Image (tube, rainbow, N blue to C red):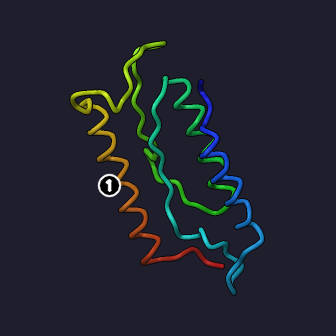
Amino acid sequence: MGQISSVAKRVLERMDALLSEADDLGRMPSYGKVAIAAIVGNEDGAHFSSAQLFQALNDVGWTIPAVAACYWVGEAMGSTDFKDLRKTPDKVTETARMVAGNAAHLAGLLQANPYPG
């Protein structure tokens, strides 16, 4: 329906506690950690969901890499679920590899050179 799930919302709400936690340099526990998303839905819904997720994650200190979301877009109002596909679409596989590669690269950079306090 173009919205993140109630489970995703609960996870984000629980991460709100990170705002009151900090290390000796004033950084939240999520600093230096990378967040990505995998979304199933229509294209507008995927864009809106990733916007919601990434803004909330950024607010509590996560770092978002370039091309941080991978989504599958089925036929509008269709009855096919991603889990029922015989084969993962090539574009989804290609994008998932890019998302994972970008996240791993950024995580390595942050590990080698953490954010200052």
Query: What residue is shown at x 67% (from left), y 75% (from top)?
Result: 27
Amino acid type at image mark 1 = Gly
Q: As drawn, is 113 to the left or to the right of 81?
A: right
Q: As drawn, is 40 to the left or to the right of 93?
A: right
In the displayed structure, would residue 24 be above or below residue 59?
below
Q: As drawn, is 36 to the left or to the right of 27?
A: left
Residue 42 is situated, as x and y percent measured from the top left of the image, at 49, 23
- Image quarter of residue 6: top right
- Image quarter of residue 57: bottom right
Q: Nearer the viewer, residue 23 or 11?
A: 11
* Quarter of the figure that contains the C terminus: bottom right
Residue on which the image places disc 1:
101
Residue 88 is situated, as x and y percent measured from the top left of the image, at 26, 33
Query: What residue is shown at x 42% (from left), y 69% (from top)?
Result: 109
Query: What residue is shown at x 54% (from left), y 24% (from top)?
Result: 44
Residue 101 is situated, as x and y percent measured from the top left of the image, at 32, 55
Q: Secondary structure at mark 1?
A: helix
In the displayed structure, would residue 48 be above or below residue 30?
above
Query: What residue is shown at x 37% (from left), y 20% (from top)?
Result: 80
Q: Nearer the viewer, residue 41 or 10?
A: 10
In the displayed structure, would residue 48 be above or below residue 110?
above
- Image quarter of residue 28: bottom right
* Quarter of the figure that contains the N terminus: top right
